[in-house]
Image (spheres, rainbow, N blue to C red):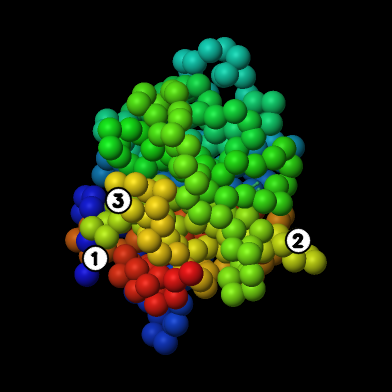
């Protein structure tokens, strides 16, 4: 068994793979775990992040209001399945007042590094860029400077410093519904000044792997394993009916994570169920968080479904690594 390098989490949500199922990632049978109206006043709750916190779990949720404004809300759960989401959005403090001004906030990732939970999200600042903040308790949230110039989305931190630097994946974009997108890696000594920008991987041009031919972006914080960083990412195909978002997996070098060792030619999960195919934006499965148990190699993936509700899916480190090695680009 490949080894996940983190802590045991024996109480994490889990279901065994259904008999006869031939995909490496399978859905929780009670999906969606969060419905569109779970919080009063919400139009939709999706593309959200969960982490172990205390004896249970905490998360940062994207809730679009019935005015369709996009904002981030803290939420809590005992079991990672049943969530209570705060009624009011996160109010960040700190930073320069100019940076604190909210245009829009969406698609948060949460990553525990050293002593705190960092939050990265798509932050409106004269166009989308990567907002960065942190919390110790999911009650008080501090905002820092944006990591990059606009336009950028999908800022995803690694859970520890690599070679002495905080390290972040991101996907440079445009002001709209970007029709391109490759994954890059950047480093920072202090979480404020980012540089050493390196290309990690891009869209696949050709029909052998068309599901990732329009744009790709990092999903959950990479999972450290004894074989490298396991990255779950999204890949997009542009069709005559719009974008279709599926999930893939890659293995990145442990010390130089801009070097890709394997990358799935076939998607590992895509929109199939009704709640993934029908909603405000049809045909979207968008992973934003993964929780793991180092003892068993289990992985639970939180993903947005059709930009409307939140689903949970399961896999293991061995399922993904085996699939990747057998079907690598
Ligand atoms: C992306 C982001 C995501 C969304 C996806 C599909 O550009 O806006 O939040 O899930 O499009 O609409």
Image coordinates for residue 318, horizontal then vertical, percent: 30, 70
Residues 182 and 245: in front is: 182
Q: Residues within 10 Å of mark 1 (few under 14, many from 20)?
A: some
Above or below for 215 versus 54: below
**Residue highlighted by disc 2:** 242
The image's mark for residue 227 is: none
- The quadrant in which residue 57 appears is top left
**Residue highlighted by disc 3:** 254
Residues 255 and 229: in front is: 255
How many labels were placed on the picture?
3
**Residue highlighted by disc 1:** 2
Quote the CA–CA distance across marks 3 and 1: 14 Å
Residue found at the very far top of the displayed protein? 97
Quote the CA–CA distance across marks 3 and 2: 36 Å
- The quadrant in which residue 24 appears is bottom left
Image coordinates for residue 113, horizontal then vertical, percent: 31, 36
């Amino acid at each position: 068994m490949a080894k996940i390098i983190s802590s045991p989490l024996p109480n994490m949500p889990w279901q065994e793979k259904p008999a006869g199922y031939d995909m490496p990632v399978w859905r929780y049978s009670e999906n969606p775990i969060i419905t569109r109206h779970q919080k009063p006043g919400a139009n939709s709750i999706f593309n959200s992040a969960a982490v172990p916190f205390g004896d249970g779990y905490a998360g940062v949720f994207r809730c679009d209001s019935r005015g369709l404004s996009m904002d981030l809300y803290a939420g809590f759960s005992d079991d990672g399945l049943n969530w209570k989401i705060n009624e009011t959005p996160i109010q960040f403090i700190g930073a320069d007042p100019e940076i604190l001004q909210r245009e829009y906030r969406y698609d948060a990732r949460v990553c525990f590094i050293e002593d705190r939970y960092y939050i990265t999200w798509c932050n409106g600042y004269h166009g989308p860029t990567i907002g960065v903040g942190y919390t110790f308790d999911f009650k008080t949230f501090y905002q820092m400077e944006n990591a990059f110039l606009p336009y950028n989305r999908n800022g995803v931190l690694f859970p520890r410093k690599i070679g002495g630097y905080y390290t972040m994946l991101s996907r440079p974009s445009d002001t709209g519904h970007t029709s391109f997108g490759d994954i890059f890696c950047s480093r920072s000594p202090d979480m404020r000044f980012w540089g050493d920008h390196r290309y990690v991987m891009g869209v696949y041009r050709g029909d052998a792997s068309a599901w990732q031919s329009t744009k790709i972006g990092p999903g959950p914080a990479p999972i450290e394993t004894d074989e490298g960083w396991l990255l779950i990412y999204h890949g997009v195909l542009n069709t005559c009916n719009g974008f279709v978002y599926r999930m893939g997996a890659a293995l990145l070098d442990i010390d130089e994570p801009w070097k890709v060792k394997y990358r799935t030619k076939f998607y590992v999960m895509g929109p199939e169920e009704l709640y993934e195919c029908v909603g405000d934006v049809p045909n979207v499965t968008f992973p934003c968080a993964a929780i793991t148990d180092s003892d068993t190699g289990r992985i639970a993936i939180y993903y947005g479904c059709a930009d409307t509700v939140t689903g949970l899916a399961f896999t293991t480190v061995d399922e993904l690594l085996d699939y990747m090695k057998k079907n690598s680009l």
